[in-house]
C-alpha cells in the first residue's frame, strides 16, 4: 500500500459502514475523527468497543482507539478529508428519497472546511445527490470555491464512492473489493483515489462522474433484487403446483448458464430493499421491471403470513379441542440475512411484528444475534434455541445454529428451506 498523504480524516456517521471505514483508515496509522449524533455510539467507541455486530470490527476498533488513531465525537472538526456515511431513507409511502441526513451532514461539516479538503459521499444515494450535496456546501461556504462552478481549480474536491460490502464480511471486503469513484472533476476523482488506496487492494475505478458512480451502486443492487424476485415468485408458483421449489432450483441450476438464487421471506437490509426505489423514483415510467421486482419481494412477507395462518388452521383441525389462544408459534430469526444482528428493513422482523399483532396465542422468538427484542415485540417470549416447545414453527432466517438443529415436531413454515 502506498503511504497516505492524508494525515487526518473525518467520517460522518458511525454505523454499519462508517465505523468499519473509520477503523480501516485508523488501522493504517491515520488519525480519524468519527462523528455521530448517537451519544451511545460515541461513548462506546471511545471506550474501544463497538455498538454493532460485525466480525473482526471489535478488535480493529479496540486497537485503533487505544493506539490513539481513532476517536468519536458529536461535532465535526477540521480534517483533510470528510467521508459522509449517513442513511438515505424514504419520505412516506411513495418511496421518494429523503436526503435530509446528507444535507444535515453537509451543513455540519461546512464551518470547518478549508482549501484543499476532499468530501466523499459514501451513502447510497439517488442520482444527483452528490451534486446536491456540493450545492449545499457551496451555499454554506460562499468564501470557498466548489467544482460545480470552478471545475478543476476549485478549493474543495467532491466525489461519490458508494460502499459495496456484504454484512458479515465488511472488514475483508472493504479491502478486497474494487471501488467505483465518481469525482465532480478529474482532479476530484484523482484525490479520492489517493485516499482509498490507503487500504483498498482492489482496483479504484474512476467513473465519468458522480452520476455514473451513483447509478452503478443502484444498478448492482437492483440486479440482485430482480434475481431474488424471480426466485421468490417461483416459490409461490411452486406452492400452487405442489412442487418443491428447492428441488426445482437445484435441478434448473444444473444448466451451465442458469444460476437461480434461493427464495426467502422477502428482501431486507439497507441496500437491496431500498436502492431500486431510487431508480424507480428517477424514471417512474421506464423502470417497469425494477418496480415489479420490488413489488414481488415486498409482497413475499404477506404470502408467508398466509402460510402461517394455514398452518395454524391445520393444527386446530388436528386438535379440535384447542382454541387459537392455545396455539404456540415459534419464529426463527429476525435479522434481514443470516448470521448478523442487522434488523434494518428485515422481512423476518416485519412478519414477526404482524404475528405479534394478529396471533392471540403465545409467540416465541429465537434470534441468537441480538440481546433484546425490539420494543414492538415486547409481549413475545425471547427464548434460547434449545428451549422451544411450539405447535407451529416458522423459519425466517437460516442462521448457522438453526441449520445444525434437527427438524422440530409440529407444523412447519419454512421460508428458507432449512427443514426440507
Image (cartoon, rainbow, N blue to C red):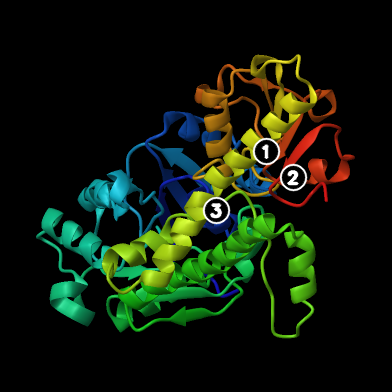
At numbered mark 3, what does the secondary structure look like: helix, strand or loop?
loop
Instruction: Choose between 1 and 236: the one closer to the eye.
Output: 236
Q: In whole angstroms, how far apart are the C-alphas of marks 3 and 2?
A: 16 Å
Check disc 2 and report its element: helix, strand or loop: loop
Q: Please state which of residues 192 and 411 is positioned toward the viewer in this rendering.
A: 411
User: Which callout, 3 or 1, points at the residue further toward the start of the chain?
Assistant: 3
Mark closest to the chain's N terminus, 2 or 1: 1
Residue sitting at 39 percent across and 79 percent down?
190
- For disc 1, the neighbor class at 10 Å (few under 14, some 14 to 19, many from 20) is many
Residue 19 in the image: state x and y as whole percent.
52, 48
Q: Is residue 28 visible?
A: yes
x and y, in percent, of residue 249 in the image? 74, 68
Other-residue count near label 3 (Cα within 10 Å), few / some / many at <14 / 14–19 / ≥20: many
Q: Which quadrant holds residue 51?
A: top right
In the figure, is residue 19 to the left or right of 245?
left
Q: Which residue is disc 1 drawn over?
A: 333
In percent of width and height, residue 147 lies at 20, 73
Mark 2 neighbour density, 10 Å: few (under 14) some (14–19) many (20 or more):
many
Residue at 27 percent across and 52 percent down: it is: 99
Task: In the rendered structure, find residue 210 and report the number of the disc placed on it.
Answer: none
Q: Earlier in the sequence, mark 3 or mark 2?
A: 3
- Total numbered labels placed on residues in the image: 3
Judging depth in this view, the residue of 9 and 410 nearest the camera is: 410
> Farthest right residue?
406
Measured in 3D between alpha carbons, the distance from the residue under mark 2 to the one under mark 1, in whole angstroms, is 7 Å
Name the side, left or right, on which 170 lies relative to 118. right
| Residue that label 3 marks | 267
> Is 338 or 389 nearer to us in this picture?
389
Q: Do the residues under discs 2 and 1 have CB atoms within 8 angstroms?
A: yes
Q: Nearer the viewer, mark 3 or mark 2?
A: 3
Q: Say left or right for 401 vs 172.
A: right
Q: Which residue is mark 2?
A: 399
Amino acid at each position: 500500500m502506498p503511504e497516505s498523504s492524508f494525515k487526518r480524516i473525518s467520517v460522518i456517521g458511525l454505523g454499519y459502514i462508517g465505523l468499519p471505514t473509520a477503523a480501516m483508515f485508523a488501522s493504517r496509522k491515520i488519525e480519524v475523527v468519527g462523528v455521530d449524533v448517537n451519544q451511545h455510539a460515541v461513548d462506546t467507541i471511545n471506550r474501544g468497543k463497538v455498538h454493532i455486530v460485525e466480525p473482526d470490527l471489535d478488535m480493529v476498533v479496540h486497537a485503533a482507539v487505544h493506539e490513539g488513531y481513532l476517536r468519536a465525537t458529536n461535532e465535526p472538526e477540521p480534517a483533510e478529508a470528510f467521508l459522509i456515511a449517513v442513511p438515505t431513507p424514504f419520505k412516506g409511502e411513495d418511496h421518494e428519497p429523503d436526503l435530509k441526513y446528507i444535507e444535515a451532514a453537509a451543513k455540519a461539516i461546512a464551518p470547518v472546511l478549508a482549501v484543499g479538503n476532499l468530501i466523499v459521499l459514501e451513502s447510497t444515494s439517488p442520482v444527483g445527490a452528490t451534486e446536491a450535496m456540493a450545492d449545499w456546501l457551496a451555499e454554506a461556504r460562499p468564501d470557498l470555491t466548489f467544482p460545480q462552478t470552478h471545475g478543476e481549480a476549485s478549493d474543495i474536491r467532491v466525489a461519490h464512492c458508494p460502499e459495496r460490502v456484504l454484512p458479515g464480511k465488511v472488514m475483508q471486503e472493504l479491502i478486497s473489493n474494487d471501488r467505483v469513484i465518481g469525482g465532480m472533476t478529474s482532479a476530484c476523482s484523482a484525490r479520492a483515489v489517493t485516499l482509498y488506496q490507503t487500504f483498498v487492494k482492489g482496483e479504484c475505478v474512476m467513473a465519468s462522474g458522480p452520476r455514473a458512480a451513483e447509478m452503478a451502486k443502484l444498478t448492482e443492487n437492483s440486479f440482485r433484487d430482480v434475481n431474488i424476485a424471480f426466485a421468490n415468485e417461483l416459490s409461490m408458483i411452486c406452492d400452487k403446483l405442489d412442487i418443491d421449489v428447492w428441488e426445482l432450483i437445484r435441478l434448473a441450476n444444473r444448466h451451465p448458464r442458469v444460476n437461480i438464487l434461493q427464495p426467502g421471506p422477502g428482501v431486507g437490509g439497507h441496500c437491496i430493499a431500498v436502492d431500486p426505489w431510487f431508480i424507480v423514483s428517477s424514471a417512474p415510467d421506464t423502470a417497469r421491471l425494477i418496480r415489479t421486482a420490488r413489488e414481488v419481494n415486498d409482497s413475499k412477507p404477506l404470502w408467508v403470513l398466509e402460510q402461517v395462518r394455514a398452518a395454524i388452521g391445520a393444527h386446530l383441525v388436528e386438535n379440535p379441542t384447542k382454541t387459537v389462544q392455545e396455539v404456540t408459534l415459534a419464529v426463527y430469526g429476525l435479522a434481514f440475512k443470516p448470521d448478523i444482528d442487522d434488523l434494518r428493513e428485515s422481512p423476518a422482523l416485519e412478519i414477526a411484528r404482524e404475528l405479534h399483532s394478529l396471533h392471540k396465542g403465545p409467540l416465541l422468538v429465537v434470534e441468537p444475534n441480538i440481546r433484546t427484542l425490539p420494543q414492538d415485540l415486547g409481549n413475545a417470549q425471547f427464548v434460547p434455541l434449545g428451549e422451544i416447545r411450539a405447535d407451529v414453527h416458522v423459519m425466517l432466517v437460516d442462521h448457522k445454529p438453526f441449520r445444525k438443529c434437527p427438524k422440530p415436531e409440529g407444523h412447519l413454515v419454512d421460508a428458507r428451506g432449512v427443514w426440507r
